[in-house]
Image (cartoon, helix red, strand yellow):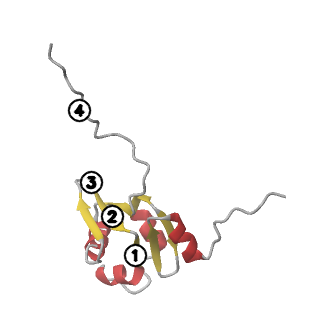
Amino acid sequence: MTAYKTAQSPFKSDSTSSGMCGFTLMNNQVGVVVAEVMGTKPGVRVTPLPSMIRIDAVRRMDVLYDEISEALGEEPGYFDAAEFEENMSTHYGRMIHEDDRTIMFANPEDAAEYLGFDLTAAPRR
């Protein structure tokens, strides 16, 4: 009798933190420029796909709006949170919008520390 062994599924769940954060952009004129700028940053990986561009980073990633505006050939202030949101289709990690940048954090604790938010649960009254 032959004994068969079942292959381990590549789709098994894993609840450990990946230590990664990122977003997906539309593969259009603006998305391509954002990807080019983000691809120059350490710890950032850009993956072009047919209809979208995936941007992934280790621990933290800052999207500096004026850096993107300049790369687009526009005046400072052209690229902002609204323009970013318009070109982004999804994200993972904790996102913080500021006036001059969007910051992505892989770990919620890092985002909370950045904001000065205390994650300790308060006792019930």
**Circle nearer the viewer, 3 or 4:** 4
Q: Residue at x 18, y 20 (%)?
A: 3
Residue for badge 4: 7
In this picture, residue 15 sits left or right of residue 98? left
Where residue 54 appears, as percent x and y from the top left, is 30, 60
Disc 2 marks which residue?
Answer: 56
| Residue farthest along the left direction in this orientation | 2
**Of the two numbered discs 1 and 3 in the rendering, the one whose residue sits closer to the viewer:** 1
Which residue position is annotated with label 1?
63
- Disc 3 from disc 2: Cα separation: 17 Å
Q: Residue at x 30, y 72 (%)?
A: 43
Q: Distance between the residues labelled 4 and 2?
A: 29 Å
Quadrant where the C terminus sits is bottom right
Of mark 3 and mark 2, the one earlier in the sequence is 3
As shown in the figure, which amino acid type bears the numbered disc 3? Answer: Ser
Question: Which label belongs to residue 51?
Answer: 3
* Residue type of the residue flagged with mark 4: Ala
> What kind of element bears circle 4?
loop
